[in-house]
Image (tube, rainbow, N blue to C red):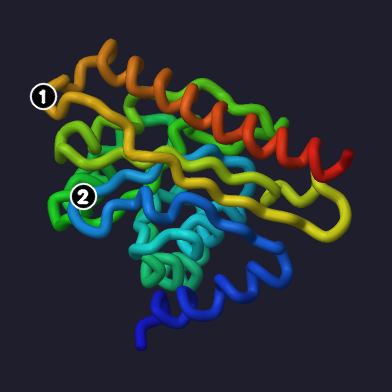
């Protein structure tokens, strides 16, 4: 059994107990072929929570600082993570991401580029979708709620929602205008999922 297999077996029940994690829309993740899961980002817990919620092994781009010390870098590499240098065009990270999709695997991206400090959904950088378009991958929007524990005192209740794959023309190209359009559409999809969670929370309090 690999480290990933062990974590995939143990984390979901632990998250269900300690984070009261609920997952919706797993059926929206294609069972095969290249997939990009594009999620909001509010906490360092997001990658393990998203990985535990998904139906397939998920590979993450993680900021290069997380790979130090070396032992921790080796650990998260075994879990499917690979480093990306933020604030610059990291060609090696892009090459790795494209290879993952070429091998019909699942890649997760956080289109906002960094964690939201307020919990609000930021603007999506269109470049986050470039690899999906190049490899004609399915783009699955995802919304994570509740992992920013400091803003939710008491017993956490985490939710992960996977939306239906976004429709786009594979031949659309990777120009800035096309990718920005995809980013704007992704943001709209995630805001709809967020609204559904807010309505549920409001009903539960009433």
Looking at the image, which residue is at 21% across and 58% down? 32
Residue 85 appears in the picture as rendered? no
Q: Quadrant of the C terminus?
A: top right
Which image quadrant: the N terminus? bottom left
| 170 lies left or right of 38 | left
Q: Nearer the viewer, residue 39 or 55?
A: 55
Q: Quadrant of residue 31?
A: bottom left
x, y percent for residue 195 = 64, 30
Residue depicted at 15% across the width and 40% down the height = 135
Disc 1 marks which residue? 171
In the image, taking residue 101 as reference, residue 165 lies left or right, namely right
State the SS at label 2.
loop
Are the two marked residues, 2 and 1, in contact with CB atoms closer than 8 angstroms? no
Q: Nearer the viewer, residue 1 or 205?
A: 205
Q: Earlier in the sequence, mark 2 or mark 1?
A: 2
At horizontal 49% and vertical 22% (from top left) the residue drawn is 188
Res. 50 mark: none
**Residue at the spot of label 2:** 34
- Furthest residue toward left: 171
Res 173 seen here = yes
Residue 19, position as x, y percentages in the image: 71, 63
| Above or below: residue 5 compared with residue 30 | below
Q: Residue at x 35, y 17 (%)?
A: 180
- Few, some or many C-alpha atoms within 10 Å of disc 1 (few <14, some 14-19, many ≥20)? few
Q: Secondary structure at mark 1?
A: helix
In the displayed image of the protein, which residue is found farthest to the bottom? 1
Mark 2 nearby-residue class (10 Å; few <14, some 14–19, many ≥20): many
Rendering coords of residue 149 (x, y %): 76, 51
User: In x, y percent, where is residue 164?
Assistant: 38, 40
* Residue 70 to residue 153: above or below: below
Depth check: give the residue in front, 122 or 89. Answer: 122
């Amino acid at each position: 059994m690999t480290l990933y297999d062990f974590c995939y077996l143990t984390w979901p029940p632990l998250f269900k107990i300690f984070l009261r994690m609920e997952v919706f829309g797993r059926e929206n993740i294609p069972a095969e072929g290249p997939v990009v899961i594009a999620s909001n980002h509010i906490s360092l817990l997001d990658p393990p929570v998203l990985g535990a919620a998904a139906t397939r092994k998920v590979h993450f781009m993680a900021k290069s600082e997380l790979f130090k010390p070396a032992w921790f870098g080796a650990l998260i590499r075994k879990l499917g993570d690979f480093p990306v240098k933020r604030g610059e065009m990291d060609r090696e990270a892009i090459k790795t991401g494209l290879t993952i999709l070429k091998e019909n695997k699942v890649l997760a991206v956080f289109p906002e580029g960094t964690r939201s400090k307020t919990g609000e959904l930021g603007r999506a950088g269109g470049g986050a979708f470039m690899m999906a378009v190049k490899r004609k991958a399915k783009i699955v929007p995802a919304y994570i709620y509740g992992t920013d524990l400091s803003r939710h005192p008491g017993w956490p209740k985490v939710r992960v929602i996977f939306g239906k794959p976004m429709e786009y023309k594979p031949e659309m190209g990777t120009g800035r205008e096309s990718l920005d359009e995809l980013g704007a559409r992704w943001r709209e999809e995630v805001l709809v999922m967020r609204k559904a969670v807010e309505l549920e929370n409001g009903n539960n309090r009433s």
